[in-house]
Image (spheres, rainbow, N blue to C red):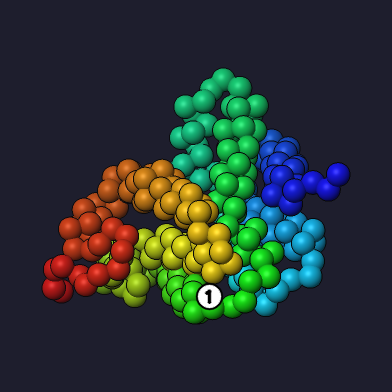
Amino acid sequence: MTQHPYIVSLLFILIICFISWVVSLIKADVSIVDSLWSLFFLVASIVFVVLEQPLSSRGQLVFTLVIIWSLRLSIYLTIRNWRQPEDYRYRIIRANNQPNFALKSLYKIFGLQGALAWLVSLPLLPAITSDASLSWIDLVAVVLWLIGFTFEAVGDYQLSRFKSREQIGLKSSDKFVLNTGLWRYTRHPNYFGDFCIWWAFYLFAVASGNWWFALSPLLMSLLLLRVSGVTMLEKTITERRPDYAEYIRSTNAFFPGPCRIKD
């Protein structure tokens, strides 16, 4: 009996999780899971494509957008983390889960992120495999995806330039907080971009006649706003960057908006 593509995608994601966990034990660094996050969705999409050929115009479009988003984010995070110590977030998790963190990381880090990615990937299945005709909803989804990709990619680029200037002692006007470019309008343009991208993928599913997959973007929104995104990042950042408190008062946390304090 032919297995359901969504179930098969989970199997492949878990295999990658296990292999990556073994690599993390060798490196003593679980930060590599960051580079894998977007690739989980690419793996799921490849499974959908292989098992549900031929693809419709929507399927080809959505698969292309997944490839672009997934590879861009994975490459960026890999370059950012290359030859760097384990991310401070994971060092905290490691310290709070002793003894036997090496074993616990299999399910608390890799297994958990793989399972979450699998749940979030749900609307990609109908969006890629449906043969319904393209509609105006697809156009709205493309526009929203482009907005999201711009915020995420440009925000990441601006942040990487800011950090590289810090490392060589060239902070512009002694600004210890990035508050220019997209970061002037939202404290987390990259997370807002990811938010838009996943609501765009959901709209593709809606256009294919599958509106009930709203759990996916809702779960991603929760992760970005309350779990591993904004909340976790800002929990300790004011201790590391004293000027961040002023930045919080002047700049929207997530959704872009005008600066509330004039220069």
Comparing 31 with 253, the one in front is: 253
In the displayed structure, would residue 168 be above or below residue 26? below
Q: What residue appears at the point 72 percent right and 39 percent down from the top-left corner?
A: 18
Q: Quick one: label 1, few (<14), some, or many (20+) residues within 10 Å?
A: many
Local SS, label 1: helix
Residue 229 seen by the camera:
no
Q: What residue appears at the point 74 percent right and 71 percent down from the top-left corner?
A: 55
Q: Which residue is mark 1?
A: 138
The percent position of residue 21, horizontal first and vertical second, equals 69, 38
Q: Residue furthest top?
A: 99
Q: In the image, is 221 to the left or to the right of 24?
A: left
The percent position of residue 252, horizontal first and vertical second, equals 25, 62
Q: Amino acid at mark 1?
A: Asp
The percent position of residue 158, horizontal first and vertical second, equals 42, 71
Q: Residue furthest left?
A: 262
In the displayed structure, would residue 113 be above or below residue 81? above
Q: In the image, is 223 to the left or to the right of 37?
A: left
In the displayed structure, would residue 53 be above or below residue 90? below
The percent position of residue 71, horizontal first and vertical second, equals 64, 65
Q: Quadrant of the N terminus?
A: top right
Number of numbered discs? 1
Comparing 172 with 257, the one in front is: 257
Q: Residue 125 lies in what quarter of the image?
A: bottom right
Q: Quadrant of the C terminus?
A: bottom left
Q: Residue 99 lies in what quarter of the image?
A: top right
